[in-house]
């Protein structure tokens, strides 16, 4: 079952999780506009067949500071992990994503994937991303990737040519960009995120 953390007053993500043999961890972290947060998170996969799925979004609307510092430790064989974090920043906000996957020498047959994708809505907003792999085993499937860019003007032109206003075209692009990280969540949570996206400029 996916655990969702919507970061705000009194809501914090535990800093450490341990996933044993055959167990699964599925977490989604959501940071909405107006919230600054520093989120450190370490996951230890300690039993064969353990599986961890981390996803999250961060929407920074003005002068927020949001940082993720994630460490995924593959300590034993035949474990899997997947991470997907997407962010949007506007105003003079600052966001950062630092993600480290460590595969120990005994952790053969590991599968570990990490992605971080970002959109900047203003010239003053900044997002830094640092995906990292430390692999000490030779029979593994691991990858990481990161992108930071702006909204696609060609997509906006296409939508506008079909009668969609410029502002609505941007909103639809942002919702589409964020949605993979929200896959499987309750409709009420997705609706709240979409409302927050409409507040971004």
Image: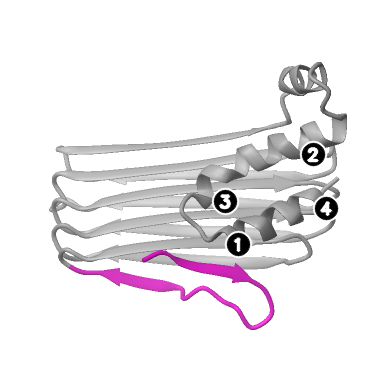
Choose mark 2 or mark 1, whichever is in front.
Answer: 1
On the image, numbered disc 4 is attached to which residue? Answer: 199
Choose mark 2 or mark 4, whichever is in front.
Answer: 4
Q: Answer whether residue 165 is magenta in the image.
A: no
Residues in magenta?
1-20
Q: Secondary structure at mark 4?
A: loop
Labelled disc at residue 97: 3
Q: Answer whether residue 11 is magenta in the image.
A: yes
Choose mark 1 or mark 3, whichever is in front.
Answer: 1
Choose mark 1 or mark 4, whichever is in front.
Answer: 1
Residue at 44% x, 63% y: name it. 27
Q: Position of residue 74 (x, y in %)?
A: 25, 56
Query: Which tag, 2 or 1, sits closer to the chain's start?
Result: 2
Left or right, 56 with reference to 192: left
Question: Circles 3 and 2: CB distance less than 8 Å?
Answer: no
Left or right, 173 with reference to 132: right
On the image, numbered disc 2 is attached to which residue? Answer: 121
Question: Circles 2 and 1: CB distance less than 8 Å?
Answer: no
Q: Position of residue 69 (x, y in %)?
A: 52, 59
Labelled disc at residue 189: 1
Query: Which tag, 1 or 3, sits closer to the chain's start?
Result: 3
Query: Which tag, 4 or 3, sits closer to the chain's start?
Result: 3
Q: Secondary structure at mark 1?
A: helix
Q: CA distance from mark 2 to mark 1?
A: 23 Å
From this view, report whether residue 173 is shown above or below residue 53: above
């Amino acid at each position: 079952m996916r655990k969702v953390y919507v970061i705000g007053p009194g809501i914090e993500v535990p800093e450490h999780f341990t996933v044993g043999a055959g167990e699964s961890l599925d977490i989604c972290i959501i940071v909405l506009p107006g919230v600054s947060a520093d989120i450190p998170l370490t996951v230890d996969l300690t039993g064969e067949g353990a599986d961890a799925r981390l996803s999250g979004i961060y929407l920074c609307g003005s002068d927020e500071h949001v940082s993720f510092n994630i460490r995924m430790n593959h300590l034993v064989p035949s474990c899997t992990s997947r991470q997907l974090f997407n962010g949007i920043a506007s105003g003079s906000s600052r966001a950062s994503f630092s993600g480290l996957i460590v595969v120990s020498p005994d952790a053969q047959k590991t599968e570990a994937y990490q992605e971080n994708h970002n959109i900047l809505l203003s010239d003053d907003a900044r997002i830094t991303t640092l995906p990292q792999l430390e692999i000490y085993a030779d029979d593994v499937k691991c990858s990481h990737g990161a992108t930071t860019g702006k909204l696609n003007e060609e997509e906006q032109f296409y939508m506008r040519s079909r009668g969609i206003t410029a502002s609505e075209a941007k909103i639809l692009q942002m919702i589409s960009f964020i949605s993979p990280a929200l896959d499987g969540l309750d409709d009420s949570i997705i609706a709240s995120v979409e409302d927050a996206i409409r507040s971004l400029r």
